[in-house]
Image (cartoon, helix red, strand yellow):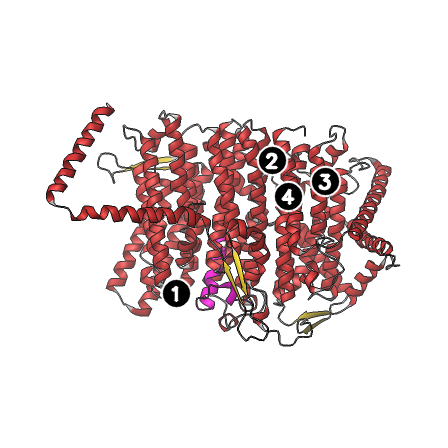
């Protein structure tokens, strides 16, 4: 099983090489590009579908396998291992990869420069496939960097020079910083003897200080990749800059690989957690969820909005992880299993609905020749019926509405919060209700956010000619979207399937599992006990569908079914133009006024001309990302100043350099002498 | 389930009647909402030219989501047959689904009215919903369950006592219920002036049977909130499971009385207060949110508050 999965990764790398060779040696031009596109994405689809089947079989069959490949460091080799946790994340990765490859069979044909995407795409997939399998620090970091660099190349792929250059620069800086943090974390875990294999790290004894440092570095390293506030600044720039199927992968899958890294280090490698570890995680998770969705509400760029929504969902996942850690530290294993299941389930759900949403955004881009501003869209539901239906389902799942899957995982998180008064620590007693409120706020704001995103971009009347002439997307793209939307419905109706599949993961990490759900009557889910709480997606769905059908049938049968089309009500003011509709900015104005002054320090400046003047009235809005201003800019300036000072070192004489060498040698020896 | 549907227009009629009497008007007859409904159902639908399928489907879904939510609240007896289908959080989320769809339908036509309604509704909802969740937390922590039947049974038993947190939760829930039902001082159900409209602005383009569905959903929602308050905070007279026909009849009668009392109180409250500016509403709802949070915090600190 493990060997087969590794071979899948190798096959992906081979596809990449073939893409380069085939393109270099074969026909060039448009036809060559189309053939190469089909071959690469077809190959990726086949390999990831195969890997998906393998990973699913491994997860359900409870396969654990280890393998040492004689690659990498000469006397160590690269260790790979498959266990329940990695199998669960592999299912997620390969499902997202298969969906994106399938989508790209259609979407990729519209790429302007396919060769800037095709060689890197399979490498990116291979990187994400290998990270969960890695079983030593060296292999892990190598695969992690493979994933980071390939995705960096993909961020730079779209020909939008200035924007993408900035996004790419910020991304590579943050990615390097994250890898550095992970490298240090693994260094601390490995100890002075250098036990690089995970198996040796698990058993090692550590001081509380070392463990705390590892936790901090894991939050920095994995959090910067996942997009935790305040490490999120690169994400809304980099994710949308890539082609849409890659955006879907980066948002839906790569952030989950980061979550995997965090779980692997904190739940598995470090050993028994302390209760206070959950405090930073819960705080960061709660603020990430609320801030992410508030940013999404203010955003006008369709893909960037989705990227901010990713940040929100990562926050929810980390809330679940923080709760699980708190429960585990206090010995409430069943509750820890509940919280961990909520987090993992939400990660899985987010992959599904965010993929569908990014595919939908890609379809909009193709249909309107690259229009990403929602203020210039509108009325797409008439022109793109299939995509609009799929995106609607995904948006409802993202807004955590029943009976879809996003609701179930948030419901589980709420249930986990409701068990937490049992925790003895006072700090948590104050923190958890607040985090619960932030979670509820994020859920409510997410609903507003998706009403806005869907209502402005897909409903109403077209605001530009490009939106008015949009055409439905190709068959592959709509099939991929519909597939993801169908899975959102499926796991919303039958969440027990996922919960039971995740049981071996929670058993491995926190030593307990949620009660088996598939045996429950009527397929409802019962996290703790019957008398406490239960939810049944199927019945809710059936009730709604049945009564809606009944109501509609009864009304059409017994009352009127007449229908007349007429112009909308215009208050007697003729010629309503599409530009007189509410825009996304005006729709979120009340929320901006309520939250803006605190969160974004937003200001509005209105300039009204005097009566009789023909000058236009102007309104200027200002919004700042406080994190950027107070954290990143000072750091950036400090780095700039430091380089200026150090720049002098470049122009010294050879004698001075020799003096420096001598002095540093003395210092090092001195340090060594004092240390022992 | 059908009972809720039957009672809903009557309750709205009652509220309207009491309000009118308080304003020294005679007011429409109690049964007027039924007649409105019948009239609307028999009229043709005048559909805006660029309405999509979503606009036509939404009324039915909004109505049924609200209806299913209302049907999951124990009205006059605990131990509903399907009470395990969804707990209180799921019920709240069902209402959120209805609101989501209504907001989309409002934006579908592409007029400013729909936009203004959706925009303000999203402001109100994004504060009211967390407040509701905090109230749910409070109640669930006291009753040890989010299952409404169990909560009602627990609240009806002796071991509840007087609690600070419950008082907070009650006040918060009343505020939320007022906001969610588009009542004064948050919204005015009788207004047709665009500056003051929230809910009415969203449904402005609806007519005929679609409007009937939307109106019915609003009425059912009022019954839902009053039943919820009654079932959690005033659960006396709820028939226990298998209590026999007499107990059920008693419970039903008491439930109707409770609804009537709630309706009268609502009408009196609405008459005695002026409508707020839209940007005063966040303060009002923020109060509910903070009360809910405070109640939950108290319970986290000690179960006996």
Query: Front-most of B3 and A467?
Result: A467
The relative height of residue A151 versus residue A158 in the rendered view (above or below) is above
Disc 2 packing (10 Å; few <14; some 14–19; many ≥20): many
Nearer the observer: mark 1 or 4; the answer is 4
Q: CA distance from mark 1 to mark 3?
A: 59 Å
The location of residue A175, given as percent across then percent down, is: 35, 47
The location of residue B55, given as percent across then percent down, is: 64, 64
* Circles 1 and 4: CB atoms closer than 8 Å: no
The location of residue B169, given as percent across then percent down, is: 69, 39
Examine the rendering and report whether any part of residue B180 can be seen: yes
Nearer the observer: mark 2 or 1; the answer is 2
The relative height of residue B44 versus residue B175 in the rendered view (above or below) is below
Quadrant of the image containing the C terminus of chain A: top left
Query: Tag 2's secondary structure?
Result: helix
Q: Which residues are magenta?
A: A354-378
Query: Tag 1's secondary structure?
Result: helix
Would you name the residue on which mark 1 appears? A109
- The answer to whether B182 appears left or right of A119 in the picture is right
Would you name the residue on which mark 4 appears? B289
- Location of residue B107 by image quarter: bottom right
Examine the rendering and report whether any part of residue B86 can be seen: no
Q: On what subunit does the disc labeled 1 rest?
A: A
Q: Main secondary structure of the magenta part?
A: helix
Would you name the residue on which mark 2 appears? A418
Q: CA distance from mark 1 to mark 4?
A: 50 Å
Nearer the observer: mark 4 or 2; the answer is 4
Would you name the residue on which mark 3 appears? B170
Disc 3 packing (10 Å; few <14; some 14–19; many ≥20): many
Q: CA distance from mark 3 to mark 4?
A: 12 Å
């Amino acid at each position: 099983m493990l060997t087969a999965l590794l071979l899948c990764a190798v096959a992906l790398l081979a596809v990449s090489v073939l893409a380069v060779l085939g393109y270099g040696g074969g026909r060039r031009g448009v036809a060559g590009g189309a053939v190469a596109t089909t071959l690469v994405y077809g190959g990726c689809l086949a390999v990831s579908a195969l890997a998906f089947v393998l990973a699913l079989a491994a997860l359900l069959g409870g396969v654990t396998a280890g393998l040492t490949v004689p690659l990498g460091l000469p006397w160590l080799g690269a260790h790979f291992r498959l266990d329940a946790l990695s199998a669960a994340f592999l299912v997620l990765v390969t499902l997202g990869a298969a969906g994106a490859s399938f989508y790209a069979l259609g979407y990729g044909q519209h790429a302007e420069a396919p060769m800037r995407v095709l060689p890197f795409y399979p490498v990116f997939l291979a990187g994400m496939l290998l990270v969960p399998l890695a079983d030593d620090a060296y292999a892990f970091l190598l695969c992690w960097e493979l994933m980071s660099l390939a995705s960096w190349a993909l961020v730079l792929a779209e020909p939008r020079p200035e924007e993408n250059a900035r996004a790419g620069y910020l991304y590579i800086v943050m990615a390097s910083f994250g890898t550095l943090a992970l490298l240090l974390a693994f260094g601390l875990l490995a100890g002075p003897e250098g036990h690089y294999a995970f198996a040796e790290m698990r058993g090692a004894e550590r001081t509380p200080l070392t463990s705390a440092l590892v936790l901090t570095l894991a939050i920095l390293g994995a959090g910067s990749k996942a997009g935790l506030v305040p490490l999120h600044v690169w994400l809304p720039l980099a994710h949308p800059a890539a082609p849409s199927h890659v955006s879907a992968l980066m948002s839906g899958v790569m952030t989950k690989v980061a979550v995997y890294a965090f779980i692997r280090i904190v739940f598995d490698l470090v050993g028994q957690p302390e209760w206070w570890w959950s405090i930073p995680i819960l705080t960061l998770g709660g603020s990430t969820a609320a801030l992410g969705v508030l940013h999404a509400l203010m955003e006008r760029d369709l893909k960037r909005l989705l990227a901010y929504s990713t940040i929100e969902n990562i926050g929810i996942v980390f809330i679940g992880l923080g709760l699980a850690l708190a429960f585990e530290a206090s010995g409430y294993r069943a509750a820890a299993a509940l919280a961990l299941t909520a987090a993992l389930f939400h990660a899985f759900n987010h992959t599904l609905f965010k993929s569908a949403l990014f595919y939908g955004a890609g379809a909009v881009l193709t249909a309107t020749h690259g229009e990403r501003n929602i203020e210039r869209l509108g009325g797409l539901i008439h022109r793109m019926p299939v995509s609009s239906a799929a995106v609607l389902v995904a948006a409802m799942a993202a807004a955590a509405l029943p009976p879809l899957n996003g609701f179930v995982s948030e419901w589980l998180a709420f249930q986990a919060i409701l068990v937490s008064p049992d925790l003895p620590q006072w700090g948590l007693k104050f923190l958890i209700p607040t985090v619960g409120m932030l979670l509820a706020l994020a859920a409510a704001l997410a609903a507003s956010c998706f009403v806005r995103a869907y209502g402005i971009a897909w409903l109403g009347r077209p605001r530009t000619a490009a939106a008015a002439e949009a055409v439905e997307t190709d068959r592959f793209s709509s099939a991929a979207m519909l597939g993801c939307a169908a899975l959102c419905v499926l796991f919303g109706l039958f969440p027990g399937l996922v919960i039971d599949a995740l049981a071996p993961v929670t058993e491995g990490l926190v030593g307990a599992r949620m009660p088996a759900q598939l045996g429950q009557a009527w397929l409802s889910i019962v996290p703790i006990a019957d008398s406490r709480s239960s939810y049944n997606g199927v019945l809710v769905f059936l009730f709604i569908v049945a009564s809606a059908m009944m109501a509609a049938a009864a009304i059409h049968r017994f009352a009127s079914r007449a229908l007349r089309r007429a112009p909308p009500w215009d208050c007697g003011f003729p010629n309503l133009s599409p530009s007189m509709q509410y825009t996304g900015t005006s729709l979120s104005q009340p929320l901006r006024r309520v939250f803006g002054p605190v969160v974004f320090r937003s200001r509005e400046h209105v300039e009204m001309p005097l009566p009789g003047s023909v000058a236009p009235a102007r309104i200027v809005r200002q919004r700042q990302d406080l994190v950027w201003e107070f954290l990143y800019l000072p750091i950036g300036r400090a780095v700039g100043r430091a380089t200026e000072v150090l720049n002098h070192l470049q122009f010294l004489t050879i004698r001075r350099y020799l003096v420096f060498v001598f002095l540093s040698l003395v210092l090092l020896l001195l340090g060594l002498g004092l240390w022992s | 389930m059908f009972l809720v549907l039957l009672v809903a227009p009557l309750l709205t009629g009652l509220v309207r009647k009491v309000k009118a009497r308080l304003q020294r008007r005679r007011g429409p007859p109690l049964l007027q909402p039924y007649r409105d409904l019948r009239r609307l159902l028999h009229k043709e639908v005048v559909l805006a030219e660029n309405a999509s399928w979503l606009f036509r489907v939404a009324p039915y879904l909004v109505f049924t989501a609200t209806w299913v939510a209302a049907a999951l609240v124990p009205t006059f007896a605990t131990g509903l047959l399907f009470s395990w289908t969804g707990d209180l959080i799921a019920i709240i989320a069902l209402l959120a689904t209805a609101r989501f769809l209504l907001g989309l339908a409002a934006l579908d036509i592409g007029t400013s009215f729909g936009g203004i309604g959706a925009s303000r509704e999203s402001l109100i909802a994004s504060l009211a919903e967390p407040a509701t969740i905090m109230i749910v937390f409070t109640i669930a922590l006291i009753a040890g369950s989010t299952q409404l039947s169990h909560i009602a049974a627990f609240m009806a038993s002796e071991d509840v006592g007087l609690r600070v947190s419950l008082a907070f939760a009650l006040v918060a829930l009343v505020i939320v219920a007022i906001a969610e039902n588009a009542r004064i001082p948050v919204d005015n159900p009788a207004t047709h002036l665009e500056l003051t409209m929230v809910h009415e602005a969203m449904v402005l383009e609806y007519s005929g049977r679609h409007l009937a569905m939307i109106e019915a959903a609003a009425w059912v929602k009022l019954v839902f909130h009053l039943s919820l308050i009654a079932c959690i905070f005033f659960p006396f007279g709820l028939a226990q499971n298998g209590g026999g026909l007499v107990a059920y009849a008693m419970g039903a009668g008491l439930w109707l009385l409770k609804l009537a009392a709630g309706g009268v109180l609502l009408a009196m409250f609405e008459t005695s207060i002026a409508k707020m500016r839209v940007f005063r509403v966040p303060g009002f709802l923020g109060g509910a949110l903070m009360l809910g949070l405070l109640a939950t915090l108290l319970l986290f600190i000690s179960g006996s508050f």
